[in-house]
Amino acid sequence: MKERGKIMTEEQKTEGCSESACSSCSQAGSCSSKKVDLHEPANAHSSIGKVIGVVSGKGGVGKSLVTGSLARQMVKMGYKVGILDADITGPSIPKMYGIHEKAQGTQEGILPRIAKDGTKIMSVNLLLEDEEAPVIWRGPVIAGVVKQFWTEVMWGDLDYLFVDMPPGTGDVPLTVFQSLPVDGIVIVTSPQDLVKMIVKKAYGMAKQMNIPVLGIVENYSYILCPDCGKKIHIFGESHIDEIAAELEVPVLGRMPLDAALAEVVEKEAFYEAENPYLEVEVL
Ligand SMILES: Nc1ncnc2c1ncn2[C@@H]1O[C@H](COP(=O)(O)OP(=O)(O)OP(=O)(O)O)[C@@H](O)[C@H]1O
């Protein structure tokens, strides 16, 4: 199926035939170019409503914080939520939620850890002997682990599974997009001009994989002066509206650098985090 150096889109996987053409084609029975579904089956003990990827074109823009915030929002609305930490070399989700115990396994799969607000979490840090040990694995091994977080983790009943992706458009996002039935992605960005190009790369990748972009979140948009309440745009003027209009996707929030959010992460108590800057109803 794979062509060297090319991402295969859903259309390309059918090698030129459209799905609707298949049913009326005289060679339908013997044809080898039928649409191939590369999605891996979830674990038999998982029943997952929507899978939402949280991506960023570059590192450090607050992707994990946004993943957690989206999860919190859905938990507060009464949904059953999980977070699959696909950021294998820089996992931060378990620590944010104060989880340091290892995940347990049974004959049938691996059990995610459950945070104090009920969010189910799986991360490589829940499997490593020493959570501070670096993960020095090659791309295909990392991608394989992410796939196992889908096929071997017993997620149970979830309305939403958020996938905290590693930054960029490398091996792991590609594996996630190809192997998991991702319903949509949220792109996290920061205000610098350079980011425009980077957002377009993340958007372009999702587009090529036929995955809807649900919206963009701009982080580090401003700081609020504690004395006069004025918004100070430390990274310069925002380009988010321009980008969103060009790509025809909604802006889901503009987050300031916020001491309360930083504190709840430092306290490892994200299960009680409030993020009032995201305008997300239902994803
Ligand atoms: N709006 C914010 N206000 C305060 N602190 C923030 C904000 N956004 C992110 N941070 C803090 O900045 C740090 C980096 O954020 P985070 O880990 O979410 O980034 P990331 O994009 O996931 O990073 P990486 O690309 O390395 O995975 C964290 O300590 C986080 O708590």
Image (spheres, rainbow, N blue to C red):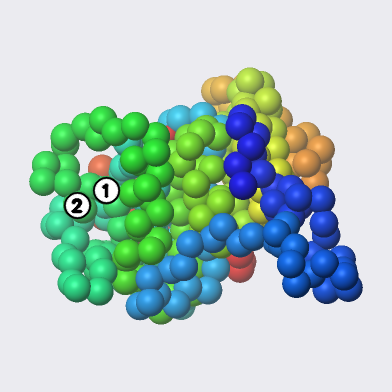
Q: Position of residue 166 (x, y in %)?
A: 44, 39
Q: Is mark 2 within 8 Å of ligand 1?
A: no
Q: Locate residue 195: give its quadrant.
A: top right
Residue 42 visible, this orientation: yes
| Nearer to me, 270 or 53 | 53
Q: Which residue is mark 2?
A: 127
| Residue 17 x, y percent position in the rendering | 82, 56
Task: Classify 10 Å Cα crowding around label 1: few (below 14), some (14-19), many (20 and above).
Answer: many
Q: Amino acid at mark 1?
A: Val
**The quadrant where residue 150 appears:** bottom left
Residue 1 picture location, percent across and down: 62, 47
Say left or right for 249 vs 24. Answer: left
Name the residue beneath numbered marker 1.
124
Q: Position of residue 278 (x, y in %)?
A: 56, 53
Q: Secondary structure at mark 2?
A: loop
Could you tell me if the residues under marks 1 and 2 are in contact, i.e. CB atoms within 8 Å? yes
Q: In this picture, is 268 found above or below 188?
A: below
- Number of numbered markers: 2
For badge 2, the amino acid type reads Leu
Q: Does 86 sit above or below residue 110?
A: above
Residue in view at x 57 percent, y 22 percent: 235
Q: Is residue 227 left or right of residue 17?
A: left
Q: Residue at x 26, y 30 (%)?
A: 136
Image quadrant in which the C terminus is located: bottom right
Pick whichever, 83 or 6, lies toward us.
6
Image quadrant in which you'd find residue 6: top right
Instruction: Determine whether 31 is above or below 7 in the image.
Output: below
Q: Name the disc covering residue 78, or none.
A: none
Image quarter for ligand 1 equals top left
